[in-house]
């Protein structure tokens, strides 16, 4: 073993430093009162604490989209980026979710609603929900997110029939210690807190003590002749409360089970049969606060596949949301304080939405759509994240592999455009941000048209990222079995084609359409592979720079109605219109749009100059593309196309240089040979025919 090793002492020190200093300490009620006066946010409710949590880990405002990106999702600071989310549509959904939580923090209504995450399988609903719970755990460990609860002590000193095992009893609902104050006195404290509170919301707490705590309070007040101070000083300890999903503290995930085994007590708690013999059946001390709503109190309740529950079972959510109470069997009502989040897939949502008997439940939900990603480069980032998080064999993922896989996924998700001027592939590219200024494509209009056509929303149907990710994984293992050190788009396409009909989530009616989309993607990859081969055959970065500078000199002279010095004679001459058009025509810019393009690149150069950036045509996608295509036209006459189509001449010096150029673009050596065979023959054929 080499390098540093972790010692038990170091591990222990690191763990201790990660825990709150007061985690094991007990405090007095007087201490807590002073603490909340110093920092009123300690007494926040669940919606307020969750809302602040999202802001705590950082935000970025996207002016273009008019939304906030939350870094716990966009950067995942706790996981060093391992669990990031990609795609504007997803961050828009997260933005909408947080807005509902923040509205609930201000008591605008959503605090009394279920936040229902709706989307197709594999769209990221569960991933996001899990991420929120994970960050809530961390936030409550920090000073900024701290919260406290209480426990009853020395109960046997006063209550004669108290079981000695219950001499110390923690607040069953982990309630905020302020509920120990009667409402009138509590409100005076809260009014003071709100005067010192720096927040967009106000502290509110009108909850009643849970039935067991109320029982102890009544008995103790009777013993001390209503001296509240004596009760709180002699029988109450304040303790730190940290959310922990494994311990079911402040976080709870609830899963639907077999309909025959569903019981409302799973949500609301049940009689503690071991205590009935001690206290009696109707005694509030004989109740077990183990229901999901009880465990989630002061934090987050997460309902997995919520709408798969029976209709009668969902009725328990009505009081939990609207009244913020639960009513267990054989026990008085219990006030609750939690953010209730539900997740569901499309079939269950459609079924419950059309059920008239579910009107009350549907009215108490706030739907947040979680569609599939609609930008194929963002989709590729999802697959790249999958590979980065896995123990991937030593294999080179060839250029365009993940992007073309993503493009296939996106084509299955977006609605066919209504206009004849934009086909499905062009729409996918537009959604990916590939729009030139001269293109007559209005992305906003395309989105609006799609929303009108889609049954629920664009991106809510199509091929799941899970299917594509699974096929990429299979293609990787197949490549390794065949001793191929690279993964190419062609291999991935083959796996898509072979397994499309074997995937249970893809309707049979869509097979033929999806096969057409796959052919579209194959053709798009073919065009990109051809561009790569042309790039390898003719690319010269110095010549691109020189031609770019020449183009800009002539453009500036054209715009300023000026002359330019001839490179050879040194004499002043008019801008070379033939040269300018030879570049612009490579982008299919018509004569009547040339001035727009020239002004566009001129503005770009001027803007960069103001920022102190030197001119580099590589930094302008459209100009770079035009110059590369012109360079190809200038140099292709010197290329030996016969060698290009001769697959057995890889040792040829010329071919070796082409392969080296492809390797510089990110190809492996074997992958470069494959793409040279695949696209090189197409290039050679086209040029030899010309």
Image (spheres, helix red, strand yellow):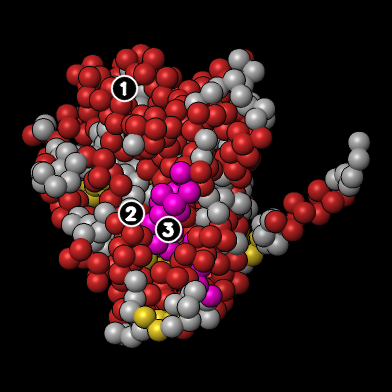
| Percent coordinates x, y for residue 360 in the rendering | 14, 42
Tell me the residue at 53%/81% (across/down): 612
Q: Quadrant of the N terminus?
A: top right
Looking at the picture, tell me which residue is in the foreground, 202 or 525: 525
Disc 2 + disc 1, Cβ < 8 Å: no
Confirm whether residue 326 shows in the render.
no
**Mark 3 crowdedness (10 Å alpha carbons): few <14, some 14-19, many ≥20:** many
Q: Secondary structure at mark 3?
A: helix
Q: Quadrant of the C terminus?
A: top left
**Mark 2 crowdedness (10 Å alpha carbons): few <14, some 14-19, many ≥20:** some
Name the residue tied to disc 2: 586
Counting residues from the start of the chain, the first of labels 3 and 2 encountered is 2
Q: Secondary structure at mark 2?
A: helix
Res 439 → quadrant: bottom left
Tell me the residue at 59%/20% (across/down): 648
Counting residues from the start of the chain, the first of labels 2 and 1 encountered is 1
Distance CA(mark 2)–CA(mark 1): 43 Å
- In the rendered image of this protein, does residue 236 appear above or below residue 465? below
Q: Which residues are magenta?
A: 614-637
For this orientation, the residue located farthest to the front is: 569
Residue 616 lies within the magenta run: yes
Distance CA(mark 3)–CA(mark 2): 8 Å
Looking at the picture, tell me which residue is in the foreground, 656 or 513: 656
| Percent coordinates x, y for residue 475 in the rendering | 51, 22
Counting residues from the start of the chain, the first of labels 3 and 1 encountered is 1
* Relative to 267, 477 lies left or right: right
Name the residue tied to disc 3: 627
Of marks 2 and 1, the one in the foreground: 2
Name the residue tied to disc 1: 505
Distance CA(mark 3)–CA(mark 1): 45 Å
Tell me the residue at 55%/22% (across/down): 647
Tell me the residue at 53%/60% (across/down): 543
């Amino acid at each position: 073993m080499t390098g540093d090793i972790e010692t038990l002492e170091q591990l222990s020190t690191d763990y201790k430093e990660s825990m709150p200093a007061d985690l094991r300490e007990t405090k007095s009620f007087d201490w807590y009162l002073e603490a909340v006066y110093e920092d009123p946010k300690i007494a926040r409710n669940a919606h307020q604490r969750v809302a602040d949590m999202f802001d705590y880990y950082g935000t970025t405002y996207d002016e273009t989209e008019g939304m906030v990106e939350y870094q716990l999702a966009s950067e995942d600071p706790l996981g060093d980026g391992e669990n990031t989310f990609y795609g504007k549509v997803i961050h828009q959904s997260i933005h909408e979710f947080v807005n509902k939580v923040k509205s609930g923090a201000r008591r605008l209504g959503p605090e009394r609603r279920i936040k229902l995450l709706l989307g197709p399988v594999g769209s990221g609903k569960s991933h996001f929900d899990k991420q929120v719970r994970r960050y809530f755990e961390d936030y409550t460990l920090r000073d900024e997110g701290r919260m406290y609860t209480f426990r009853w002590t020395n109960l046997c000193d006063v209550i004669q029939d108290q079981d000695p095992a219950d001499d110390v009893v923690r607040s069953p609902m982990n309630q905020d210690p302020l509920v120990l104050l009667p409402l009138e006195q509590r409100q005076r404290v809260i009014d003071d807190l709100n005067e010192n509170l720096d927040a967009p919301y106000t502290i509110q707490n009108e909850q009643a003590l849970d039935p067991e705590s109320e029982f102890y309070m009544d008995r103790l007040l009777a013993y001390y002749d209503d001296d509240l101070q004596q009760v709180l000083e002699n029988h109450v300890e304040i303790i730190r409360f940290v959310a922990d999903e494994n311990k079911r503290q402040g976080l709870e995930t609830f899963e639907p089970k077999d309909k025959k085994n569903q019981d409302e007590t799973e949500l609301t708690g049940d009689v503690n049969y071991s205590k009935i013999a001690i206290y009696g059946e109707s005694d509030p001390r004989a109740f077990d606060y183990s229901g999901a709503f009880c465990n989630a109190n002061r934090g987050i309740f997460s309902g997995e596949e919520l709408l798969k529950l029976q209709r009668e079972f969902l009725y328990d959510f009505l009081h939990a949301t609207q009244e913020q109470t639960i009513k267990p069997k054989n026990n008085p009502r219990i006030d609750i304080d939690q953010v209730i989040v539900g997740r569901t897939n499309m079939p269950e949502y459609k079924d419950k939405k059309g059920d008239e008997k579910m009107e009350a439940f549907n009215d108490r939900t706030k739907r947040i759509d979680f569609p599939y990603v609609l930008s194929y480069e963002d989709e590729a980032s999802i697959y790249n994240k999958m590979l980065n998080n896995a123990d991937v064999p030593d294999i080179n993922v060839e250029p365009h592999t993940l992007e073309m896989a993503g493009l296939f996924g996106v084509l299955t998700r977006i609605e066919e455009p209504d206009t004849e001027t934009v086909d499905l592939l062009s729409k996918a590219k537009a959604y990916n941000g590939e729009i030139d200024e001269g293109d007559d494509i209005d992305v906003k209009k395309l989105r609006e048209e799609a929303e009108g056509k889609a049954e629920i929303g664009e991106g809510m149907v199509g091929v799941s990222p899970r299917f594509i990710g699974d096929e990429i994984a299979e293609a990787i293992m197949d490549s390794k079995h065949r001793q191929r050190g690279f993964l190419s788009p062609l291999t991935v396409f083959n796996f898509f084609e072979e397994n499309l009909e074997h995937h249970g989530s893809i309707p049979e009616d869509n097979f033929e359409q999806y096969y057409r989309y796959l052919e579209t993607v194959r053709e798009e990859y073919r065009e990109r592979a051809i561009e790569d081969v042309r790039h390898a055959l003719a690319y010269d970065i110095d010549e691109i720079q020189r031609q770019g500078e020449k183009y800009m000199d002539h453009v500036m002279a054209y715009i300023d109605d000026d002359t330019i010095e001839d490179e050879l004679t040194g004499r002043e001459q008019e801008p070379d219109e033939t040269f300018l058009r030879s570049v612009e025509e490579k982008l299919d810019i018509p004569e009547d749009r040339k001035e727009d393009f020239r002004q566009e690149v001129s503005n770009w150069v001027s803007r960069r100059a103001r920022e102190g950036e030197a001119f580099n045509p590589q930094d302008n996608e459209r100009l770079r593309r035009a110059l590369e295509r012109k360079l190809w036209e200038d140099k292709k006459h010197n290329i030996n196309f016969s060698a290009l189509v001769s697959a057995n001449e890889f040792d040829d010096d010329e071919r070796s240089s082409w392969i080296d150029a492809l390797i510089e673009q990110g190809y492996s050596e074997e992958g470069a040979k494959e793409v040279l065979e695949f696209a090189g023959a197409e290039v050679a054929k086209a040029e030899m025919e010309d």
